[in-house]
Amino acid sequence: MTKHTLAFAASALLVALPQMAHADDDYVQVAIGADYSTGDYGQDEDTDFLAIPVSVKLQRGDFNLRVSVPYINVSGPSDVIPGNGGVRGNGQGNGGGGGPSSSSRSGIGDTNIAATYSLGLSDTTYFDVTGKVKLPTGSQEKALSTGTTDFTLQGELLQVFGDVSAAVRAGRRFNGENDDFPLEDVWLAGAGLYLVSGDSTFGLDYDWRDGSLPTAPNRSELTGSLTQKLNDSLRLQGYAYTGLADGSPDVGVGAQVLVRFGE
């Protein structure tokens, strides 16, 4: 059975914009959203994902901490798992030798925790160091999680040119492994352009990541986003993305409401 790796970024963490403001920002932000994507991930049948992520972010000066947990629904081949999983390693299928069966399953997904510290190299240049951990709170039995704990270390360089900012990032993801998923550590990279126009922020991001299994395709995605500041406490964000490789969904869309307290 061919093994595949699957990207499911938006349901795990919010679409990330660079930290345009650093010092003197102290607030708590709560966000809830919805994300839908579909793709075949190199298989004969499409897999559809619907995610409702809830997150909390604590910002203190140049440091922030984010926690996100999604509720997810997956419809499609029963061996496709959100995140880095790919097919089950225990040989599940439809019993007829024709490949995996299809199913619809839902539940809480994996919990993602990320901490970022931003270093101001100049008034217009910043370097962000981020550490992430993915906790396997999703059900492995229901094919909602690989059941592994994964760690990511990433650096991002951001340059501000007035209302336009550009960012490049790279990192390493250290995947856990178990009997079903002998996941490998992988490299990741990306870049972004951001335009601030009044209370609107437009973003265009590209992200790439190695496949986490020897036979898994890489992840490659392009995302466009718009974040609208309604007032000091309330922001709305919408985004759409497309996959450029079998490890990513064909298309996806999402939206979220972000509420800040104490700013």
Image (cartoon, grey):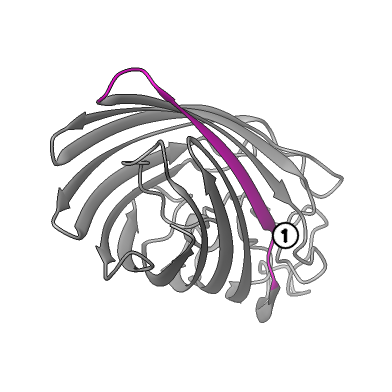
What's under tag 1, amino acid-wise? Ser
Q: Is residue 226 magenta?
A: no
Tally the marks.
Answer: 1
Residue at the location (73% across, 74% down)? 94
Query: Which residue position is annotated with label 1?
Result: 145
Judging depth in this view, the residue of 182 and 125 nearest the camera is: 125
Outermost residue, top side: 121
Residue 131 vertical position relative to residue 16 in the rendered view, above or below: above
Q: Tell me what residue is drawn at x 48 percent, y 38 percent.
A: 61
Q: Position of residue 99 (x, y in %)?
A: 66, 66
Looking at the rendering, which quadrant does residue 257 occupy? Answer: bottom left
Secondary structure state at the residue bearing disc 1: loop
Q: Residues within 10 Å of mark 1 (few under 14, many from 20)?
A: many
Residue 90 rendering spot, x and y as whole percentages: 83, 56
Identified at 74% across, 57% down, the residue is: 88
* Residue 118 part of the magenta segment: yes
The spot of residue 235 in percent (x, y) is 34, 67
Which range is magenta? 108-123
Q: Quadrant of the C terminus?
A: bottom left
* Image-based side of 128 in relation to 205, left or right: right
Q: Residue furthest bottom?
A: 104
- Dominant SS in magenta: strand
Q: Nearer the viewer, residue 241 or 216?
A: 241
Percent position of residue 180, x then y = 82, 50
Residue 94 appears anywhere in the view: yes
